[in-house]
Amino acid sequence: MKPELFHAVDDGGESARARKAMVDLGLVEHVRIRNVFYPEVLADLRAHGGAHTPAIWEGSHLIEGADAVIAFLHTLV
């Protein structure tokens, strides 16, 4: 399963930081990007217990916050 990066364009740039890190680390092909603008994506984020973006679902638990998400992305390299 690919990790899923939940992001928003209106979260003060935090999701942009996480997306940039994903690109800089060469992980575009390895992480599924999901925009919470879409109701079904927001519902999936909430189903995983999330309330904030950016967040990443890695298959067993949700990681929230840009710094935590970026740290997780570094573990994938």
Image (cartoon, grey):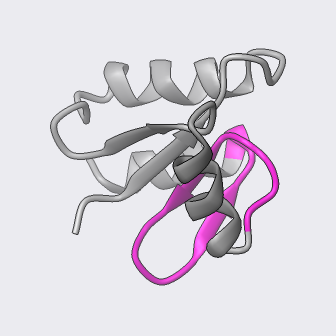
Q: Is 37 within the magenta?
A: no
Which residue is drawn at the image coordinates 31% and 29% (left, top)? 25
Q: Quadrant of the N terminus?
A: bottom left
How far across and down, in percent of the image, does residue 11 sit? 80, 24
Q: Quadrant of residue 2?
A: bottom left
Vertical position of residue 12 compared to residue 58: above or below: above
Which residue is drawn at the image coordinates 35% and 58% (left, top)? 3
Relative horizontal placement of residue 20, taking residue 36 as reference (left or right) = left
Relative horizontal placement of residue 25, taking residue 30 as reference (left or right) = right
15, 68: nearer the viewer: 15
22, 33: nearer the viewer: 33
How far across and down, in percent of the image, does residue 43 sit? 63, 59
Residue occupying the far front of the picture: 39
How far across and down, in percent of the image, does residue 47 sit? 64, 73
55, 49: nearer the viewer: 49
How far across and down, in percent of the image, does residue 16 sit? 60, 18
Q: Is 66 within the magenta?
A: yes
Residue numbers of the magenta segment: 50-67
Vertical position of residue 57 compared to residue 41: above or below: below
Vertical position of residue 10 compared to residue 37: above or below: above
